[in-house]
Image (tube, helix red, strand yellow):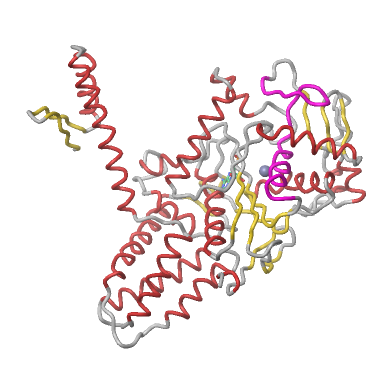
């Protein structure tokens, strides 16, 4: 029997503000959409935290036996610098500054995003669609919204008519805002503004002659509004209604609010059954953000090369730090907090090894079944990973007591203990043994140095001594010494 039949999961639904029993639309299947990154710069640890929360959620849903279709998009067009309808496309701006093609920017940072997520042991989503790959779908949705009377065209741009929409629907229900209050609190429009109301938002923007990222449409050349891509891609792959939609808390308004409005205006259905929002990672009490410079890159965590850090940390230790906080709580980043997490993580990993060779007895001093259920209870309670980790440490405590002959366990119970610890630590939390990372890193280093040794040999054979000396000297400066011998060249790391 599938685990989800025995374990009733509850999810905190941001739309209702309540923890609700999770009942998917189609038994045994889950459709989940999470807003992906805008690939105009390297991801920072705050972005990683949000995606990690949903990786843990994806992992637990799979663990419960659900067949999950997890869609996480790549935003490669339409996200403007003011996060609204004004400014330049973030990707086009980067391309202009770097004097490269926008799609080179997209490629570079998509690769970076994937590399970072792989290093943190993320599971890949089932589908990773891009905004530029779904322009036709976005145009079709705009046509439907205009047909239904909830959007208007102005000078080659199309805007969503929030005021008309709010007459038959409720704009603001996700973020708990009232349209009247929003109108009262915003400045009046200027004469040159195209919008009829400041709350209206762009579905399609006319592209000026200088705008490189442009597509033909019934309203002329232009590009889609940022909110529209997620409506197009979520419904295309998951249906007009689907189970879970996630993202960071900062996307609730306007991005997700607008997604709901677009769906209701185009198709007439409430798209999402459970809205989930992950909370922010802060640095010195301020939201981590690229734009303010208040951010830390994952690469800096691994090397320790940052004024915020005293040393480097293994990816799994950083992952453990993130998952020790509830995904709905704010988490503040600090060197001390990371060091404390690393200690806990190492203690957990040590117990994972010890438990494999524990002595068994004729009776158990712990009730393993009850303990195992308490691990599930923690995760069934809206993916409460810190409580799960506290339960896993109950397991760690028992493992040490048994090792020190202060407690006992039967062979069957030990099997269950090992199986449960491994399932939660490796499969659900996605942690990896720190040694494994070090070994993988060693083999990568050896591979890279071997390649340089080969290039140096080729340079010498070509009498290019300048290059061969450069390779030797620069490796030495990095603490890698090459030794030439009769068997070839070897190296030592100092
Ligand atoms: P962006 O690439 O800016 O669209 O952001 C990608 C994801 O990272 C979104 O889900 C954001 O909500 C999330 N995010 C941005 N800053 C932070 C932060 N400081 N902490 C946690 N999540 C964040
Ligand atoms: Zn989105």
Residue at image position (30%, 69%) is 356
Look at the image and tell me in which quarter the N terminus lies.
Answer: bottom right
Residue at image position (48%, 35%) is 112
Q: Position of residue 38 (x, y in %)?
A: 60, 36
Residue at image position (85%, 28%) is 194
The stretch in magenta equals 212-239
In this view, the residue farthest toward the bottom is 362
Residue at image position (15%, 33%) is 490
Total number of numbered discs in the rendering:
0
Q: In this view, does 251 lie to the left or right of 301?
A: right
Q: Position of residue 91 (x, y in %)?
A: 61, 28
Splitting the image into 4 quarters, where does residue 422 fall?
Answer: bottom left
Q: Where is residue 193 in the image (x, y as percent from the top left)?
A: 85, 27
**Ligand 2 visible in quadrant:** top right
Splitting the image into 4 quarters, where does residue 276 fall?
Answer: bottom right
Q: Is residue 150 magenta?
A: no
In this view, the residue farthest toward the top is 463
């Amino acid at each position: 029997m599938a685990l989800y039949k025995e374990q009733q999961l509850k999810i905190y639904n941001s739309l209702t503000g309540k923890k609700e029993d999770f009942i998917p639309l189609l038994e045994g299947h889950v459709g989940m959409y999470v807003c992906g990154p805008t690939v105009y710069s390297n991801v920072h640890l705050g972005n990683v935290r949000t995606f990690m929360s949903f990786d843990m959620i994806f992992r637990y849903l799979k663990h419960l036996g659900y067949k999950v279709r997890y869609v996480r998009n790549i935003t490669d067009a339409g996200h403007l610098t003011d996060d609204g309808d004004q400014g330049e496309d973030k990707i086009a701006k980067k391309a202009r500054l770097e004097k490269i093609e926008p799609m080179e920017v997209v490629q570079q940072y998509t690769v970076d995003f994937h590399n970072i997520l792989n290093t943190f042991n993320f599971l890949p989503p089932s589908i990773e669609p891009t905004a530029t790959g779904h322009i036709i779908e976005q145009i079709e949705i705009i046509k439907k919204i205009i047909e239904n009377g909830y959007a208007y065209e102005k000078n080659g741009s199309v805007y969503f008519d929030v005021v008309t929409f709010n007459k038959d629907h409720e704009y603001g229900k996700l973020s708990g805002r009232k349209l009247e209050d929003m109108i009262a609190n915003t400045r009046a429009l200027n004469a040159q503004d195209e919008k009829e109301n400041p709350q209206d938002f762009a579905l399609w923007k006319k592209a000026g002659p200088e705008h490189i990222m442009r597509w033909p449409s019934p309203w002329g050349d232009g590009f889609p509004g940022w909110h529209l891509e997620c409506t197009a891609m979520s419904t295309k792959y998951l249906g007009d209604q689907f189970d879970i939609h996630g993202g960071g808390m900062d996307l609730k308004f306007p991005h997700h609010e607008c997604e709901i409005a677009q769906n209701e205006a185009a198709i007439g259905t409430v798209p999402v059954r459970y809205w989930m929002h992950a909370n922010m990672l802060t640095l010195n009490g301020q939201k981590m953000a690229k734009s303010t410079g208040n951010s830390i890159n994952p690469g800096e965590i691994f090397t320790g090369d940052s004024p915020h850090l005293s040393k480097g940390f293994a990816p799994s230790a950083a992952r453990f730090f993130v998952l020790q906080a509830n995904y709905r709580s704010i988490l503040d980043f600090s060197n001390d907090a990371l060091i404390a997490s690393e200690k806990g993580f190492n203690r957990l990993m040590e117990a994972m090894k010890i438990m494999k060779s524990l002595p068994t007895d004729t009776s158990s001093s712990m009730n393993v079944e009850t303990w195992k259920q308490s691990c599930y209870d923690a995760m069934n309670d809206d993916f409460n990973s810190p409580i799960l980790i506290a339960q896993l440490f109950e397991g760690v405590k028992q493992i040490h007591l048994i090792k020190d002959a202060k407690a006992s366990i039967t062979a069957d119970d030990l099997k269950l203990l090992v199986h449960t610890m491994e399932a939660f630590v490796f499969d659900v939390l996605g942690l990896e043994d720190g040694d494994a990372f070090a070994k993988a890193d060693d083999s990568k280093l050896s591979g890279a140095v071997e390649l340089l040794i080969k290039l140096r040999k080729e340079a010498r054979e070509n009498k290019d001594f300048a290059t061969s000396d450069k390779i030797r000297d620069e490796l030495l400066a990095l603490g890698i010494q090459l030794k030439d011998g009769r068997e070839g060249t070897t190296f030592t790391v100092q």
